[in-house]
Image (cartoon, rainbow, N blue to C red):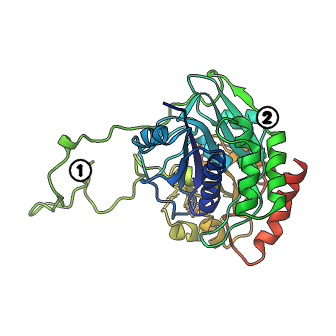
Amino acid sequence: MGRLFAVEIVYRGIFQKTLAKNISRGIVLAAHAEGKPGISFGRYGDSPERNGIPAKNFAIVGTDDVTLEEGMAKYEPTEVDISIAVDDTLCKGVESWAWYGLQPINRLLKPGGALIVTSREQPDALIAMCHRKEYPYRLAIVKGTPSFSGLWVYKDDHTDVRILGAVAKLLPDLVGLEAVQKVILAEWRDPLKATSAARAYERTTTTTVRPDQGNPEKPYQFELPKWWEMREGIAIPCIRPGQPMQDMDNHKTGGFRPERNPTFKKFTTRTMRPVVNFDTCIKCTLCWLQCPDSCFDVTPDGLYDANMEACCGCGVCEAVCPVTDCVTMVNEVAFHDNASQWEMWKKDKDAYQTWLNGKIEHRPERSHGFRYRGQYEEQTPEMLEIAREG
Ligand code: SF4
Ligand code: SF4
């Protein structure tokens, strides 16, 4: 039996769908150019047609047909040689629609495997975000901001080919740089992209991450009910005659009471989060009304506190808030927990203001994909400059 290679690309639904496909397809085509068969596919259980939802693409390559067929009998790899996170906020862990609970970004990595992250952060900052792993692995950073585009448009900022160059450097048995460049010229017909891949190849270095490094938290998980514990068919609970409507779980009465979902939290969909200036809030209720995920809790003093376990970072609250700079979307990388902002403000208003200003001022702005005509023409030159100069 020959050798089987597996690479996963973890990306954000819609914003990076084409990017992830380009990378996995590029790996398979480059391997094919070297005589190795492979297959590129998206994970069945994902729903990448939602803004920001974490989703996966895989590139599986064998040194021969039989090895590939044998590997694909498992359908989805249980371990990978390389994990690619094309947005650094995914390093905090991912909760996709394909599973329940939070999964570390490095979960499938083999011992000594490589995690490639697109980021402008330093290795220490990324390592602090990743959950600890029981054995060492390598971290490589492809410098740059996350490449977000839309469903029907693609931001051609060379992120795809730069990642291919990094893959060639980290796992030359899978694909060599020559094959990568050959495929880039055949597929994209752009010599500049082939040059960007070569530059990424030359610049890619790794940091070894030890088992005692990283986020020590245990990712939240819960027990799914067993099939024999489920009720038969679809049971719709009714109101008992003469009795008020009861909540099935807590047996409380008195109508609908909004609650947070204890098992599906959604916050890993977020690449930015809102921060609220409670001192300037006029309590107009618009953020509370318009938030598509009903994230805002009404506080005892009539303010609105976005629950960070439920917020998916869509930015609607910032858009609807009528007060200038009262709600500001900030890069998710700047935060290390989901603590209540209102509680922080209530405890020490001056300290909160300092915290707030620090978050707003010291983090680069991100953009959720395609928002206006001409946007990519404005954003792409910066990424091409990074591709050129490092
Ligand atoms: S960004 Fe604002 S509107 Fe969007 S989910 Fe979060 S709190 Fe709600
Ligand atoms: S929309 Fe702005 S001003 Fe209105 S309640 Fe929300 S945070 Fe306050």
Closer to the observer: label 1 or label 2?
2
Left or right of 269? Residue 243 is left
Total numbered labels: 2
To which quarter of the image does residue 246 belong? bottom left
Q: Residue at the right extreme?
A: 389
Question: Looking at the image, which residue is at 40% across and 51% down?
Answer: 261
Q: Toward which corner of the image does residue 93 lie, by quadrant?
A: top right
Mark sitting on residue 205: 2
Counting from the top left corner in percent of width and height, residue 170 is at: 71, 36
- Tell me the residue at 16%/49% (across/down): 231
Position of residue 46 relative to residue 177, above or below, is below
Q: Position of residue 358 (x, y in %)?
A: 78, 48
Distance between mark 1 and mark 2 Cα atoms: 57 Å
| Residue 6 locus on image (x, y percent) | 55, 40
Determine the residue positioned at 61% across, 49% down. 32
SS category of the residue bearing label 1:
loop
- The kind of residue on which mark 2 rests is Thr
Give the side of residue 231 with respect to residue 81, left or right: left
Q: Which mark is residue 45?
A: none
- Residue at image x 54%, y 47%? 38
Which label was assigned to residue 251? 1
Q: Secondary structure at mark 2?
A: loop
- Answer above or below: position of 166 versus 110: below
**Residue 334 in sight from this viewpoint:** no
Q: Quadrant of ligand 1?
A: bottom right
Confirm whether residue 351 shows in the render: yes
